[in-house]
Image (cartoon, helix red, strand yellow):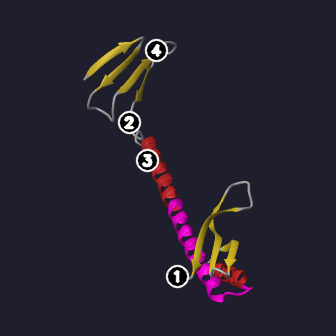
Amino acid sequence: MSADSVAGTQIRTGTEGAGPSLSAQDPASGRSTVAQVSDAGSSTVPAVGIAGAAAALALMVGTIGQGLDARARADAAADLAAIAVVQVQGENGCATAEEVAERNGARVSECITRPDLGTATVTVEAPLGIRIPGTDDDLTVEATAVAGRAE
């Protein structure tokens, strides 16, 4: 056991207890007080930091996956809506595109038909499912598809 003394305080290290102990003498009463110094709980702060980082990473991966899913839904809805417009080839082509897009979880933001060329361009928006705090609007993903006759 070793002991160091600084201004009436002794630091003892050894194998008697949980860790080093501090002892000091109260000048008024002359009584000695001993406090055990322990490293118990010292890993709590790093563990909380690691858990927080893991939670942030999981949230980020989930958000990216949600974005990729919304993009795939928007692409599929745009493709199907454009094909539907070309197959209908009439005045209600864009109405058909809106119906098809709605069935696929999207809404038509632009529909251009060219009956003379037999082509249609449809742009749809699909909700991402993420809302910006302080707004009433969901984020959306946009996709455009062109369909027409093969030349």
Residue with the mark numbered 1 = 150
Viewer-nearest of labels 3 and 2?
A: 3
**Which amino acid type corresponds to the residue marked 3 in the rendered image?**
Ile
31 is higher (above) or lower (below) than 46: above
**Which amino acid type corresponds to the residue marked 4 in the rendered image?**
Gly
Q: Is residue 79 shown in magenta?
A: yes
Q: Earlier in the sequence, mark 1 or mark 3?
A: 3
Write down the region rendered in magenta: 63-92
Circle 4 Cα neighbour tier, 10 Å, few/some/many (<14 / 14–19 / ≥20): few
Viewer-nearest of labels 3 and 4?
A: 3
Q: Secondary structure at mark 4?
A: loop
Q: What whole-number distance in Å separates the C-alpha atoms at marks 4 and 1?
A: 102 Å
Q: Earlier in the sequence, mark 4 or mark 1?
A: 4
Residue with the mark numbered 3 = 50
Q: Are marks 1 and 3 in contact (CB under 8 Å)?
A: no
25 is higher (above) or lower (below) than 88: above
Direction from residue 27 to residue 125 in the image, left or right: right
The image quadrant of residue 140 is: bottom right
Q: Tell me the residue at 48%/59% (across/down).
A: 61
Q: What whole-number distance in Å separates the C-alpha atoms at marks 3 and 2?
A: 19 Å
